[in-house]
Every structure is written in C-alpha cells, then in structure tokens.
Amino acid sequence: MNKTLCMRFLNWRIVGRKWRTRNLKLSALALGGLLVAVCFPAQAQQQAKVWKIGVLVSTSHAENASREDGLWQGLRQLGYVEGKNITLEYRYADGQLDRLPELAAALVGLKVDAIVVSGTRAAVAAKQATSTIPIVLAGVGDPVQAGLISSLSHPGSNVTGVSRLSPDFIGRRMELIKEVVPKTSHLAALSNPDNPAQSANLREIAIEARALAIELETVTARNPSEFESAFAAATKEHADALLLMPDALFHTYPSKIVELAARNRLPATYDRSDFVEAGGLMSFAVNIADLSRRAANYVDKILKGSNPANLPVDEPVRYDFVINLKTAHDLGLTIPPNVLVRADRVIR
C-alpha cells in the first residue's frame, strides 16, 4: 500500500473524533492499529531474539577448529545465522585445565542461553558452575560415570547431548591393536587419573584385554612433566603396545606423546587423527565434527523449549580409522591387507 495513502487513512477525522459510542471508538482504534501494521511492517514486528550460546573449550582455537566448523554447520542447517538470531561466546583453556572452572563461571556471568562443551573436564566444570543453564555435550567419555546425568535415556539434569563413547568403541580399538601388532601380550594404557571418566573406561579395557589374552598395565600422567616417566614405566613393564586414553591433557601435546612413543619403540593407537598426522601409528576415533553437528540439534531443541532433563543422550555413529604406513615401517610392522582396506585414510 502507498505510504502517502496510508497517512491519509490514519489522519481520518472520523478516528477518535466523530465516533461517539464506546464500541465505535474501540473499532476505530483497532482499525488504526491494523493500518499501522500494514503501512509500517518493520515497526510493527517485534525484533527477533538473538540467542547467546557459550562454548567452553579445553584446548586452543586452532585445536578446536573441526569442532567449531561442525557446530556452525549444524546451526546453519537449522536456520541460525551469526549476529541475526544467534551469537557464540567462546572460552578457551588452551590446555590449562585448571582454568576451566573460571571460564565456565565467566560464561554463566554472561547469562548465556546454553553452554556447549566437549570433554569430560569441561563438562564437569560447566555443571559445577550452573544447575539451571542448559549444558549440551559435544563429546564426553561417560557422562553417567562423571556424575553429569542420571542415565543416557533420562539425563534428569540440565545436561544432555552426545557422548563420545559407544558400547563397542573400546573393543574395536583393542581388536585393532591385536590385528596390527599380533605379538601383543602386554598392553600399556596411558591414563590421566584426574579425568573422572577414565576409571570406568579402564575397567572396560581390562575386560576386553582378558578376552584377548592381553595383560594390561595402566601408566599415568597428570601433567606434561610426567609423560616421560609414564612411557618409562610402560617400557619397564615390557609393553608390546600402548593405548592412549581420551583426555584433554593428551590432546594438547600430540607431538610430544608421539615422539615419546617413537623413542620407546611403542606401537600406539590414539583416539584422534592428529596424533597419526604427527607421526603416530594409528587412530580409531569418533568423528569430532559429526559430534558437534549433532550437538547443534540439541541446542535447537532447547532454544525451542525442550527440557534437557528429558532429552536422551545420544551416542556417536561415525568413526574414523587412520593409519600411518611410514611409522609402521619404522616400527618393523606389516599392516595386514584386511586392516588396510578398512582404513578411512592412509598416510604414506
């Protein structure tokens, strides 16, 4: 409708002046409101809400790139646009895990509408910082064991999302070790005892090890200064191979860990492909970007009113198997063809 014509309608003297009865006055007001909405739609519409989402990261921006890309891809597919209807506030611990509680509290102070986390330590820090703001997991080892939720099917708290482990994940890693290093009779598992999710994972590894007639030895490191002693302990126990447990501390120092594995001539399997890219033997890992894409679905549901306590926690569905043939050659290993053909990526 022409704006000049609209103004003429709005200036009719009949509105509020010549109509005398109460009903006619109400009708005039309604007509006036309708004309304003038609003539000036931008002013009539309520401004769209811009949701504020906090993202708590244990590592650095560079190390978190695939997660960030996956989260944004998922959000865009659901119709979210940065600055238009959503904004993300990132807080990076840069591997300094003792900073996570402080960073989580900072996000709570910003009054974000939800907090996305990856990694058990980050999730625990967020949960300790708030019991009301929804927390969305984009990959956590065992959220039940960590005390984050009551059960996968019914979280019962402000935490939900996607876990990092599925029932057969550890078993498949163990089987790969036996296939690639058939002589394995002693296995060292490198663990961070400060990670609340790892005790349950180690129990499961012990069960799988017994089934494969492998003796398991746990070696530990709480900080980078303990890496060398952990590898020395594995060598002292005559470990034939090493399995790295998922942990943000280890993820911050892939080159250092790979270098120690090479120095001690320990074939190792990792939970992230960047270890293999740094020269590690092989990795069997969840697809990090896929976890973050799926976490975006939980963010969307929560922003539309769903209660996180009633949203079942999902499990990973995509895994990547990467192997480094040069490292295998350096260790004197021959990768069986039936294993090589299953690899998603081969580094030569």
Image (spheres, grey):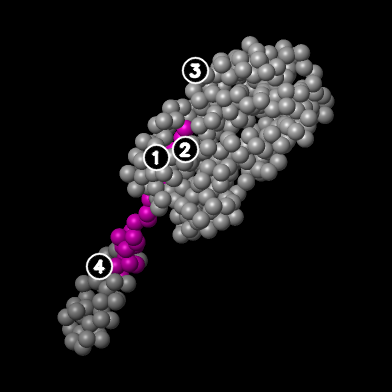
CB of mark 4 within 8 Å of CB of mark 2?
no
Q: Secondary structure at mark 3?
A: helix
* Quarter holding residue 154: bottom right
- Closer to viewer: mark 3 or mark 2: 3
Q: Residue at x 56, y 22 (%)?
A: 254
The three-letter code of the residue at mark 1 reads Ala
The three-letter code of the residue at mark 2 reads Ala
Q: Residue at x 37, y 55 (%)?
A: 48
Alpha-carbon span between mark 3 and mark 2: 22 Å
Q: Is residue 279 visible?
A: no
Q: Which residue is mark 1?
A: 104
Considering depth in this image, is 141 or 219 the residue closer to the camera?
A: 219
Residue found at the very far right of the displayed protein: 337
Q: Residues within 10 Å of mark 4 (few under 14, many from 20)?
A: few
Residue 175: x percent and y percent?
Answer: 76, 32
Nearest to N terminus: mark 3 or mark 1: 1
Q: Which residue is mark 2?
A: 122
Residue 221: x percent and y percent?
Answer: 54, 23
Q: Which residue is mark 3?
A: 225
Q: Residues within 10 Å of mark 3 (few under 14, many from 20)?
A: few
Nearest to N terminus: mark 1 or mark 2: 1
Tell me the magenta residue range: 35-58
Alpha-carbon span between mark 4 and mark 3: 76 Å
CB of mark 3 within 8 Å of CB of mark 2?
no
Q: Residues within 10 Å of mark 2 (few under 14, many from 20)?
A: many
Q: Which residue is mark 4?
A: 7
Is residue 51 part of the magenta span, yes or no? yes
Q: Residue at x 52, y 19 (%)?
A: 226
Alpha-carbon span between mark 4 and mark 2: 58 Å
Asked if residue 23 is positioned above or below residue 247 in the image, the reply reads: below
